Amino acid sequence: MRFVWAVAAFVLAAVMIGAGIAQRTIFQGPRTETATISVEDDAPYLLIDGAVLNQLPGTQTLRARGEGEIFASYGRTADVQAWLADTEYNHVTLEDADAVETTLVEPQPTETGAATEPAEGEAAEGEAAPEEAAEEGSTDAATEAPLRDPVGSDLWLDEYQQADLLIAPLQLPEEMSVLIATDGQAAAPAAVSVSWPLRTSTPWAGPLIVGGSILMAVGVFLYILGIRHARRSRGPRRKGLPLAVTEPIDLAVEGADKGVISSSGSRRAVTGGRRAFAVVPAVAVSALLFTGCSADAWPQLVPSATPTPTATVVAPEGQQQPAVTKAQAERILTRISATVADADAALDADLAATRLEGAALEARKTNYKLRAAISDYTVPPAILAKPLEVILPQAFEGWPRSFIAVADDDASKTSSIMVMTQQDAWSDYKLSYVASLEASTTLPELAPAYIGAPQVEPDSPFLLMPPEEVAAAYSDVINNGEDSAYYPMFEAEGDQLRASIAADRQRRLDDFNQTGAGTGTLEFQSGPGAQESFALATIESGAIVAVNINETDTAKPTNPDAVIKTDNTPTVKTLSGADQSATGFFTTFSDQVFFYVPGPGSNEKIRLLGYSSDILDAKVIS
């Protein structure tokens, strides 16, 4: 009977294990759903709308096949469409019936100004008919449409590039789109597909496999008991005469090899057989246990945990999206840093101009000119890129758009605050302001990077002082000190710029008076620089304001027979191109200064955050 139960257990275990394995293999169904994108017309770019990527829930896997390098990037749909506005591209959208459709989009005509519209059906004098003009305009637009390489654009949130076959895992919301291209010249790959994982749960696979394994172990146990019982009950059970008492036979004696038959071999065989028999189910059970260990192979008896919401900052109603994300800002600043480092090493102002503008570029140009003539002239500080401690993007979806960043240098224990601006969708971000933060600087409370901050208008009345007036007011404080009408509005404590300017002016005046006290004068004056102010709002109704201030030194002779020499000022000599002058010299220094300007109802004063100062120019007074 034990053998019967053992066989029944084996059969039932095999059925259970087979059913469990079948659920995880042949009966499980497809693991992914794939949508193939059909492209009929050749175009240099292929834009896949976010709705197409979100047909099904879960992560998206993009595949594009072609010859050579294949490029893919993603960004906000409005940004990508703005980048493609003046060129031809294929646009993949999702229709109402969940059908994917590809449409060839022609470049938009460039607006050249308003014109008087002719009457319907008539053409203005000297112009072609409307139909002809439309045809000519579309032909010219298609012919003159720029073909640009999308690789490395600052507009993308991320990008991928692979040879022949591109596979990119994505998880994008509907407001983002994917751009696919090669080099912007050849046609974009036509073999494109998007796939999503399908969640197919088999809740009874695990219990069936484990239950079958346990049942198989029970069957093995019953089978062993059956063998044991059969051996014990083997042979006749008869009563015989009592036998004489005999001594036990020692198998290890000398006569063991003289025809004595040993049973030890058969015992070893039986024992070994039992061990081998027991190992088989143990291995089988372990393998089957590992087969059904995934979470979707078991019934979900306990509901999944619900994440606890955390406190977030909510963007004001109607505020636009931030210009950049934190990862995007880090990538942009890394590119700027690398390009400027190459320009610094090669003294290449044209290369620097690809990533710098405004006061930051002018300071670099002057430095390159001085370093080319003066061997030991100081190299400008490198543009810090990582780690970024603060990212404050402008909340603006148009152009130009900007962001403020603060980066730390662990080696020198210094920090820099910078302003980067992108003029249009096709331009790279350029750094226009850069300054070192004061060691004791405490930044005001700023909005998180995923919300951003609106730009404050230059003439805004909603601050203690309009941003466009800060440079002139601070210059007046530098010139007149406590006698300035603006002195009470600026925080004097911790203002190292005013202290350093005063000390530097006194040092240069003392050096000048050693030789020219009776024959010349040295005067100092500060005023707003050429770079326009820039301001982003803070949470407490204030703003971070960046301004440009110029400091001008005027050295003039007071004796008609005297001249101003530049022997002790090689920078002035190099920039002016003169060894001496009977009329004197103008020397200009450029300051890039960051302030915190509070709101009008605040008890705080305008506070200096950071600054940088560089020589800008030197000229002979005409």
Image: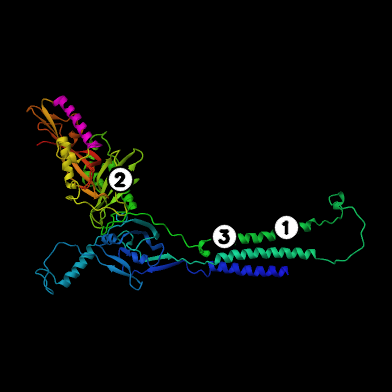
SS category of the residue bearing label 1: helix
Q: What's under tag 2, amino acid-wise?
A: Val
Quote the CA–CA distance across marks 3 and 2: 51 Å
Q: Earlier in the sequence, mark 1 or mark 2?
A: 1
Q: Position of residue 413 (x, y in %)?
A: 34, 38
Residues marked 1 and 3 touching at CB (< 8 Å): no
Q: Is residue 464 above or below residue 70?
A: above
Please name which of the two marks, 1 or 2, marks the residue nearer to the observer: 2
Residue that label 3 marks: 290
Quote the CA–CA distance across marks 1 and 3: 28 Å
The label on residue 406 is 2
Q: Nearer the viewer, residue 61 or 458?
A: 458
Q: Nearer the viewer, residue 240 or 35?
A: 240
Q: Earlier in the sequence, mark 1 or mark 3?
A: 1
Examine the image and state in which quarter residue 444 appears. Answer: top left
SS category of the residue bearing label 3: helix
Q: Is residue 399 above or below residue 55?
A: above
Q: Position of residue 346 (x, y in %)?
A: 28, 42
Can residue 566 be seen in the rendering of this structure? yes
The residue range painted magenta reads 492-516
Q: What's under tag 1, amino acid-wise?
A: Gly
Q: Is residue 357 magenta?
A: no
Q: From the image, which quarter does the N terminus lie in?
A: bottom right
Q: What's under tag 3, amino acid-wise?
A: Phe
Q: Earlier in the sequence, mark 3 or mark 2?
A: 3
Residue that label 1 marks: 272
Judge the density around disc 1: few (<14), some (14-19), many (≥20) Cα neighbours within 10 Å.
Answer: few
Predominant secondary structure, magenta span? helix
Q: From the image, which quarter does the C terminus lie in?
A: top left
